[in-house]
Image (cartoon, helix red, strand yellow):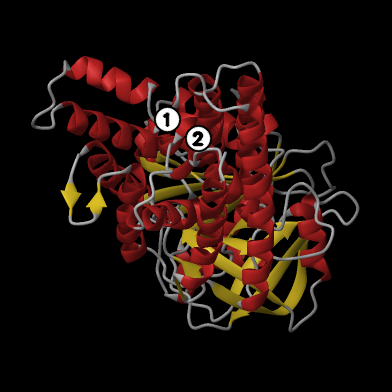
């Protein structure tokens, strides 16, 4: 899986989804051309062009009307999902339906919103409105047997990128059990389950739509509950007034639950200053303009920074919040190469005090333990130090005393950020150990060198068997050090890893 992860980590989550949907759409065109799909090629091709064109125009108009910063890929992802669900148009009335639903989906992000954050999955709410209007154009033809192989492949790739398999299983299990044992189902439950998987939108729905970050809850436990709720409604056949059980109704209902348990606000942030914290590591301090942001040490935000001529990685990134909730400013830190970094990071570095950026989708389970007596071991690599900066600053500011060993690796001695804080935190029980992993060791270096090994862990943390380990850094580093810990007999439940869906 390392090869796959290395490839996926070269793209942002949104690009993986966008390219995946593009591939599914291309396969649909090919299958239609060779007669495997029930829809003629002309209908499929013109529907695709119409939805994409209307989606772009509607997105541009609404974004300007509401003065909102949006992701570069958002409109196209929404358009492609609509294309794969709605019946390919062959009449004027069907073309009109495509136009109306696409506009509804784009409008929902701005009109059905609170504090700059949309509440519903835009595709799902548009389909619900279409259903209430009495249209029968929602086909979910991406769930056909012919489309299942490519939908399954792309879905699994997306889940691997987002690390959200924990959302798949609760949804699938609950949906299948509920549907198979619904009163009045005359068929063999096993046959019902089989047909639901291979002849319906379950795979596409579960992997692409259910896991959408903008409308999913912020923590793993809440996401599992959310998935189970949507699965229950997906598998349950009901009819309440004008509302019938459909996948889109199930998702919209789940969105309401998610909104109730999530951060309600999409924040505008004003840059106050940018400071160099280590070689190539810049810290950006922002003032929230839309009220105080409530968060826990170790959580992350999605940051949107519109800029011209952005590269294939788009205009959105996930960054851990480097500041502590005890501080008034919101800080992020990033490693930036002025020549080779993405256009997003270059635009971030070009920001001047007073410039604004958008932050949303607060989330993350990589949080400081509530048990103040628990032994903790932080292992950080490079820019992976940011969540630990938040945690340690919080401990110092609150006058706590904790038993924490920090193993902090960097390629070179000038790559360690925030070391004055960690050295200050010795008085709070933090034991910082700096490890140079590169070939150049400066004269008089008193820290460690080489990679963190099992012997180093045993020497520096003799009671490691009773500790909770936190790993944060490049994905390869996290995977390798997790293997080291497992070789020492550290159980998986005692290892927390920092992963969020956006590099």
Q: Residue at x 84, y 53 (%)?
A: 337
Q: Earlier in the sequence, mark 1 or mark 2?
A: 2
| In this rendering, the label closer to the viewer, 1 or 2 | 1
* Left or right of 344 in this view: 493: left
The residue positioned farthest toward the front in the image shown: 92
Estimate the spatial distance between the alpha carbons at disc 1 and disc 2, rounded to whole Å: 11 Å
How far across and how far down the image is residue 332, in percent? 64, 65
How far across and how far down the image is residue 452, in percent? 61, 35
Q: Residue at x 72, y 55 (%)?
A: 416
Element assignment for label 2: helix
Element assignment for label 1: helix
How far across and how far down the image is residue 325, in percent? 47, 73
Quarter of the figure with the N terminus: top right
The residue to which callout 1 is attached is: 203
Q: Quadrant of residue 158?
A: top right
- Whether residue 271 is visible here, answered yes or no, is yes
Q: Residue at x 56, y 43 (%)?
A: 91
Q: Residue at x 30, y 36 (%)?
A: 170
- Whether residue 304 is visible here, answered yes or no, is no
For label 1, count other residues whose C-alpha is less than 10 Å away and answer few (under 14), some (14-19) or many (20+).
many
């Amino acid at each position: 899986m390392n090869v796959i992860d290395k490839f996926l980590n070269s793209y942002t989550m949104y690009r993986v989804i966008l390219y995946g949907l593009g591939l599914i759409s291309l396969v649909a065109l090919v299958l239609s051309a060779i007669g495997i799909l029930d829809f003629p090629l002309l209908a499929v091709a013109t529907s695709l062009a119409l939805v994409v064109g209307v989606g772009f125009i509607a997105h541009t108009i609404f974004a300007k009307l509401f003065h909102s910063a949006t992701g570069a890929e958002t409109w196209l992802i929404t358009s492609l999902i609509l294309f794969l669900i709605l019946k390919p148009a062959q009449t004027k009335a069907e073309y009109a339906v495509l136009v109306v639903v696409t506009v509804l989906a784009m409008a929902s992000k701005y009109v059905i919103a609170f504090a700059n954050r949309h509440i519903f999955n835009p595709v799902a709410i548009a389909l619900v409105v279409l259903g209430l209007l009495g249209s029968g154009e929602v086909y979910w033809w991406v769930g056909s047997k012919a489309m299942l192989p490519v939908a399954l492949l792309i879905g699994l790739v997306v889940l691997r990128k987002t690390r959200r398999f924990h959302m798949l299983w609760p949804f699938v299990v609950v949906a299948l059990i509920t549907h198979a044992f619904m009163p009045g189902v005359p068929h063999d439950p096993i046959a019902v389950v089989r047909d639901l998987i291979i002849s319906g939108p379950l795979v596409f729905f579960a992997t692409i739509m259910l896991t959408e970050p903008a409308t999913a809850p912020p923590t793993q436990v809440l996401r599992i509950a959310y998935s189970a709720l949507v699965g229950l409604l997906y598998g349950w056949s009901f009819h309440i007034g004008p509302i019938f059980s459909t996948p889109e109704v199930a998702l919209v209902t789940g969105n309401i639950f998610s909104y109730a348990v999530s951060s309600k606000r999409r924040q505008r942030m004003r840059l106050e200053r940018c400071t160099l914290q280590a070689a190539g590591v810049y810290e950006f301090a922002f003032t929230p303009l839309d009220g105080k942001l409530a968060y826990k040490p170790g959580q992350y935000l999605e940051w949107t920074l519109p800029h011209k001529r952005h590269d294939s990685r788009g205009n959105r990134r996930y960054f851990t919040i480097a500041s502590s909730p005890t501080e008034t400013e919101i800080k992020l830190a990033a490693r930036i190469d002025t020549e080779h970094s993405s256009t997003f990071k270059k635009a971030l570095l070009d920001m001047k005090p007073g410039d604004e950026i958008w932050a949303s989708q607060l989330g993350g389970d990589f949080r400081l333990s509530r048990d103040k007596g628990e032994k903790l071991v932080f292992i950080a690599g490079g820019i992976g130090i940011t969540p630990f900066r938040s945690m340690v600053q919080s401990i110092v500011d609150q006058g706590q005393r904790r038993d924490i060993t920090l193993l902090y690796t960097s390629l070179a001695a000038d790559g360690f950020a925030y070391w004055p804080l960690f050295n200050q935190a010795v008085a709070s029980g933090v034991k910082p150990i700096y490890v140079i992993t590169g070939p150049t060791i400066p004269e008089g270096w008193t820290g460690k060198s080489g990679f963190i090994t099992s012997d180093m862990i045993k020497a520096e943390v003799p009671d490691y068997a009773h500790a909770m380990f936190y790993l944060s850094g490049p994905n390869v580093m996290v995977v390798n050090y997790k293997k080291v810990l497992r070789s020492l007999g550290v159980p998986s439940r005692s290892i927390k890893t920092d992963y969020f869906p956006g590099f």
